[in-house]
């Protein structure tokens, strides 16, 4: 990646400013780290809660400028854009867990769909020249209409989450076309890391492997083991977000590994890494089977490779091993006394 030092005190260049929503989440924390390293001033928007969770950003908490805001409150977003005066806005906040979107379809629509319009409006009103990144998702392909999926593949979402993300994608495209805003939609396939939420399948598995290995758990209840996903490393994917905003023109890009694995393979890789056989521990529980499933996701990111020069660094096995290692460390620390 090209290295540009924006805050070089000797170069006299203006320090770039970024506003990141969802900064305490997996992607937001990696992106904030990356932008800070590049010399950006990073404004992180956070929602007021009585018990804040800074786990993912604890190491950079003091380097982030915190702004209080709520995705459902346009006034607060206008204020966030006014205070941060951003060159780049990364909209990563959402209700991001597919399974939670059936029991909470309207909250998902508010946070994952309508909130994108709130953010775009805040930018359009206060600083329309700011560059905007929308976190779109491979879940928009749902019941896939072609394989592999690329930017031109029609969407067929299969969950209230997927439906909401389709809205977010198209409103981003529409603001680009209506108001000539520099608005990009990154269609990211599943991306994981040790910071992934514990309910997502990769992290659920690597956390369970660590607990089982260390003797504090004895079974793992799972849903559909035949689902196929294209899993990459979040730390690689956030670089693509940044690259999209450094181009001459705003556009939409698929980001993926181009490889898919079943949930069963994920279990095999994770359990065998610590010398265990998953079939001795995994129990199928209908609670984790979804009302409508996305059977297969496989991305073709040729466009991103060619136009952005983006490349993948961490492969599937390496990713899962890294996650198991981190969970072993954490569970060991939690259970030590
Ligand atoms: P998603 O692709 O955004 O829904 O990411 P997830 O990590 O939540 O799920 C990936 C796939 O794993 C889906 O097809 C799920 O149905 C499947 N899966 C199977 N068992 C489980 C489980 O126990 N938890 C979760 N989250 N997913 C599961």
Image (cartoon, rainbow, N blue to C red):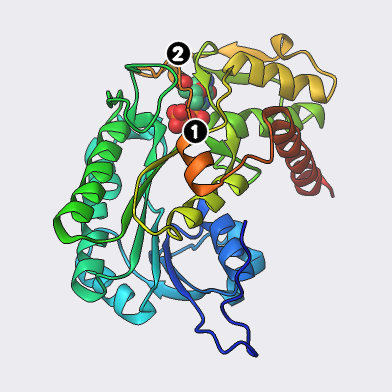
Q: Residue at x 16, y 61 (%)?
A: 179
Residue at 58% of width from left, 56% of height from top?
Answer: 30
- Does ligand 1 reach within 8 Å of label 1's beta carbon? no
Instruction: Name the one closer to the observer, 240 or 68.
Output: 240
Viewer can see residue 10: yes
In terms of image quadrants, where is residue 183? bottom left
Q: Is residue 195 left or right of residue 45?
A: right
Spatial distance from mark 1 to mark 2, Cα to Cα?
Answer: 37 Å
Of callouts 1 and 2, which one flags the residue occurring earlier in the amino acid sequence?
A: 2
Picture layout, residue 55 above or below residue 146: below
Beta carbon at label 2 within 8 Å of ligand 1: no
Viewer-closest of 321 and 38? 38
Question: Residue at label 2?
Answer: 286
User: Element type at marker 2?
Assistant: helix
Viewport quadrant of the N terminus: bottom right
Quadrant location of residue 100? Answer: top left
In the rendered image, residue 233, in percent from the top left (x then y), is placed at: 62, 40
**Foreground disc of the pair 1, 2:** 1
Question: Looking at this rendering, what residue extends furthest in the left direction?
Answer: 178
Give me the disc on residue 265. Answer: none
Residue at the spot 34% in from the left edge and 23% down from the top edge? 142
Q: Which mark is residue 302?
A: 1
State whether residue 182 is above or below residue 143. below
Mark 1 neighbour density, 10 Å: few (under 14) some (14–19) many (20 or more): some
Left or right of residue 30, residue 103 in this image: left
Q: Is residue 25 visible?
A: no
Horizontal side of 161 relative to 180 (left or right) equals right
Q: Position of residue 200 (x, y in %)?
A: 52, 33
Q: Secondary structure at mark 1?
A: helix
């Amino acid at each position: 990646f090209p290295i540009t030092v924006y805050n070089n005190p000797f170069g006299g260049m203006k320090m770039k400013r970024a506003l990141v929503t969802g900064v305490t989440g997996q992607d937001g924390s990696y992106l904030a780290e990356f932008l800070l390293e590049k010399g950006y001033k990073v404004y992180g928007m956070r929602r007021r809660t009585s018990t804040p969770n800074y786990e993912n950003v604890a190491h950079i908490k003091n380097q982030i400028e915190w702004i209080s805001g709520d995705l459902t409150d346009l006034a607060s977003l206008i204020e966030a854009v006014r205070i941060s005066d951003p060159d780049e806005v990364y909209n990563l906040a959402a209700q991001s867990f597919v399974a939670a979107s059936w029991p909470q379809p309207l909250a998902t629509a508010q946070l994952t769909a309508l909130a994108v319009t709130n953010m775009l409006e805040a930018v359009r009103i206060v600083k329309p020249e700011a560059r905007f990144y929308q976190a779109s998702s491979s879940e928009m392909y749902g019941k896939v209409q072609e394989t592999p999926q690329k930017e031109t593949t029609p969407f067929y979402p299969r969950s209230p989450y997927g439906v909401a993300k389709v809205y977010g994608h198209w409103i981003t495209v529409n603001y680009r076309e209506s108001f000539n805003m520099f608005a990009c939609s990154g269609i990211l396939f599943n991306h994981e890391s040790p910071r992934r939420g514990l309910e997502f399948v990769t992290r659920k598995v690597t956390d369970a492997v660590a607990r089982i290995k260390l003797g504090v758990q004895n079974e793992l209840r799972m849903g559909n083991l035949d689902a196929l996903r294209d899993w990459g490393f979040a730390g690689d994917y956030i670089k693509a977000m940044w690259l999209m905003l450094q181009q001459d023109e705003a556009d939409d890009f698929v980001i993926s590994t181009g490889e898919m694995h079943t949930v069963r393979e994920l279990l095999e890789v994770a359990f065998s890494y610590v010398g265990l056989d998953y079939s001795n521990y995994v129990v199928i529980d209908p609670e984790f089977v979804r009302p409508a499933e996305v059977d297969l996701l496989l991305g073709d990111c040729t466009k991103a490779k060619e136009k952005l020069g983006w490349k993948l660094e961490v492969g599937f096995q390496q990713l899962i091993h890294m996650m198991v290692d981190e969970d072993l460390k954490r569970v060991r620390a939690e259970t030590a006394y």
